[in-house]
Amino acid sequence: MEKILNVKKKIKPFNKTIFVEGDKSLSIRWVLISSLSKKKSIAYNLLKSEDVINSIKCIKSLGSKVKFNKNKCEIIGNGFHVKKKGKILIDAGNSGTLGRIILGLLINSKNKIKLIGDKSLSKRDFSRVIKPLKKFGAKFDAKKNLPLTMRGLENPKPIKYFETRGSAQCKTSVMFAALKSKGITEIKAKKSRNHTELLFKYLRIPIKIKENKNFDIIKLKGINKIEPLDYQIPGDISSCAFFLVLTILSNNSQLLIKNVNINSSRTGVIKILKRMGAIIKFRNQKKYKGEKIADIFVKSSKKLKSINCPKEWNSSAIDEFLIIFLVAAKAKGISYFRNLDELNHKESPRLIWASKILNLMGVENTMTKNSLKIRGNPNLILNKKITIKNFLKDHRVFMMSTIAALTFGGDWKINDADSIKTSFPKFLKILKQLNQ
């Protein structure tokens, strides 16, 4: 039965300290990397979302042994070669990260591999990984969408690849395939999340990275074994972003979020919010296995200003724009966001949904194919009924709507509350904690 959230009151002022669940990108990467080691890898604070659970199911079906209890996960992988015989079925559920990366991980499997996903994932573009993986020598029966079937090869050849979208998923898929090739793969990649590069460096995998302004040059040598990875997964900044904006838009409130990953390829949301007048500070900064970690302090902001968002910040805030748009709705002046066509290639067409929700709120906005202009209203208070439904169960659309309801007021009916299980199962629980 569909779970519906009803919100009829704004959140009360709060002064709290919270922890958010483990970073989703790092959780999935840890699971997949650990599946390549024949020794035991251990993770703490692994995100218990559907995307991560599906990743665990996938590596178990390939032969890895997994023990998962309350706050600890142990994986003993089966090395670089799939031992299972016959056809392999991989169900990535809703996870583009899992679906795209695991194809690269399985590049050296001669098994016939069928990849499927849910309704939302089946509409997303897989040509962006099919094309480079074909260069390694893999064969596919599809050009773009799921379901698809791939057949790898025992000795994939190294390639040269130009990643132009700023997609960390595509880059990582190629990097996993490169691990299993004999020789050096060279990737010219538009700036995107660099979690995989940092993990590979920490594991002493032979990787060289030359950073330029807009692109990185990555040279990666194939190997035949990998060391285990013990990891304390830091909090996910994408999950934090909803509580940052909740605090910024609430009255007389402040919040401290502990032990969050502040990797520079993920902190675009912080840059954008601070430029708009938000009061956000990093505390207790440290480095952990290549990643930057900190506690994040935020407080209510009474004077928010519009932004002409620099397009070079887009890739480091791509998952947070929905919630950023709510701040623009409250800011004085007109905000401009451009070159965001990638948002419409997510779990739902997010740019379209952002405009729809703002329209329902009475916020003046203009959307084109890849941009959004928002005229903010610092005095906006809602006193009407709003229903959000049919958004392909996109977890971020649900969470954006919830934050809007709690900060702008109104009588909201938000469908598909179970969608948060994809990335942030404890979202509503933490909200309840803040509203006590």
Image: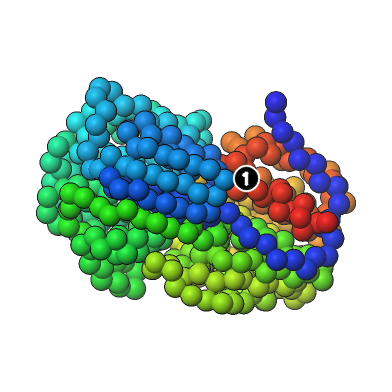
| Other-residue count near label 1 (Cα within 10 Å), few / some / many at <14 / 14–19 / ≥20 | some
Residue at the spot 42% in from the left edge and 46% down from the top edge: 74
Q: Which of the 4 quarters of the picture holds residue 249?
A: bottom right
Describe residue 303's horizontal placement relative to residue 368 as left or right. right
Would you name the residue on which mark 1 appears?
Answer: 425
Q: Which of the 4 quarters of the picture holds residue 235?
A: bottom right
Position of residue 264 relative to residue 431, above or below, is below
Q: Colour scheme used in the picture?
A: rainbow
Position of residue 50 relative to residue 289, above or below, is above
| Residue 398 pos. (x, y %) | 66, 45
Residue at the spot 54% in from the left edge and 58% down from the top edge: 236
Which residue occupies the foreground of this view, 229 or 223?
A: 229
Say what amino acid the circle numbered 1 marks.
Answer: Pro
Which residue occupies the foreground of this view, 421 or 78?
A: 78
Describe residue 376's horizontal placement relative to residue 411 as left or right. left
Residue at the spot 74% in from the left edge and 70% down from the top edge: 254
| Residue 126 pos. (x, y %) | 36, 39
Residue at the spot 43% in from the left edge and 69% down from the top edge: 288
Which quadrant of the rendered structure holds the C terminus?
bottom right
Describe residue 185's horizontal placement relative to residue 12 as left or right. left
- Determine the secondary structure under disc 1: loop
| Residue 169 pos. (x, y %) | 38, 50
